[in-house]
């Protein structure tokens, strides 16, 4: 898997909504109406991730969920991350 | 809700398994066999938390889950946190 530099990642990020490049990964913060909705989103992302065997770093507190994607084997952002980000956007 | 200092929290922590006091909260790292089990645990903790309306900070990457409990209104650790930690231990 080819790793994208921050500059190379920019045009790919432009196709997504509010994802940011940060420290060799891409991340986005999601806000929900309540905790139950946040938990539902976490489960949906988890099932997507397990299907493609590519797992995010996930942080949750109450109505807020932060998803961070990076390809450990490549030491940075690859198409695996953009593909999963796109699938998450489509939820 | 009365807030426990780190020293006051110690005897309460001794009743739990591998929870640590850290920065006005208590936290524990849980390891699982695979992501599916980690996700199942996250959902169980989430349902417990929603029932008592006290929500953890949760961090997950692959088979690893870190739960951090703190009572925001009290600015530190209270019985709400120890009660939820105890319930999590019983899962």
Image (cartoon, coloured by chain):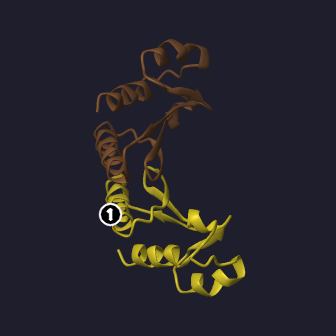
Chain colours: A yellow, B brown
* Nearest to the observer: residue B15 or residue B33: B33
In the image, taking residue B91 as reference, residue A61 lies left or right, namely right
Name the residue at 33% across, 59% down.
A43
Compared with B45, B35 (above or below) is: below
Determine the chain carrying the residue at label 1: A
Compared with A39, A22 (above or below) is: below
In the image, taking residue A39 as reference, residue A85 lies left or right, namely right
- The quadrant of the rendering that contains the C terminus of chain A is bottom left
| Residue A30 position in % (x across, y down) | 47, 65
* Nearest to the observer: residue A77 or residue B87: A77
Name the residue at 46% across, 63% down.
A31
Query: Which residue in the structure is indicated by mark 1?
Result: A47
* Nearest to the observer: residue B86 or residue B39: B39
- The quadrant of the rendering that contains the N terminus of chain A is bottom right
| Residue A55 position in % (x across, y down) | 45, 61
Q: What number of labels is visible?
A: 1
Compared with B59, B81 (above or below) is: above
Label 1 crowd (10 A; few <14 / some 14-19 / many >=20): some
Secondary structure beneath disc 1? helix
| Residue B84 position in % (x across, y down) | 37, 30
* Nearest to the observer: residue B88 or residue B2: B88
| Residue A75 position in % (x across, y down) | 64, 65
In the image, taking residue B76 as reference, residue A32 lies left or right, namely left
| Quadrant of residue A46 within the rendered picture | bottom left
């Amino acid at each position: 898997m080819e790793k994208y530099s921050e500059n190379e990642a920019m045009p790919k990020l432009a196709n997504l909504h509010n994802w940011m490049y940060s420290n060799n990964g891409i991340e986005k913060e999601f806000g929900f109406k309540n905790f139950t909705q946040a938990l539902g989103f976490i489960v949906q992302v988890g099932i997507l991730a397990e299907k493609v065997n590519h797992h995010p770093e996930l942080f949750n507190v109450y109505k807020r969920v932060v998803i961070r994607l990076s390809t450990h084997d490549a030491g940075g952002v690859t198409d695996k991350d953009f593909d999963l980000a796109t699938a998450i956007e489509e939820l």
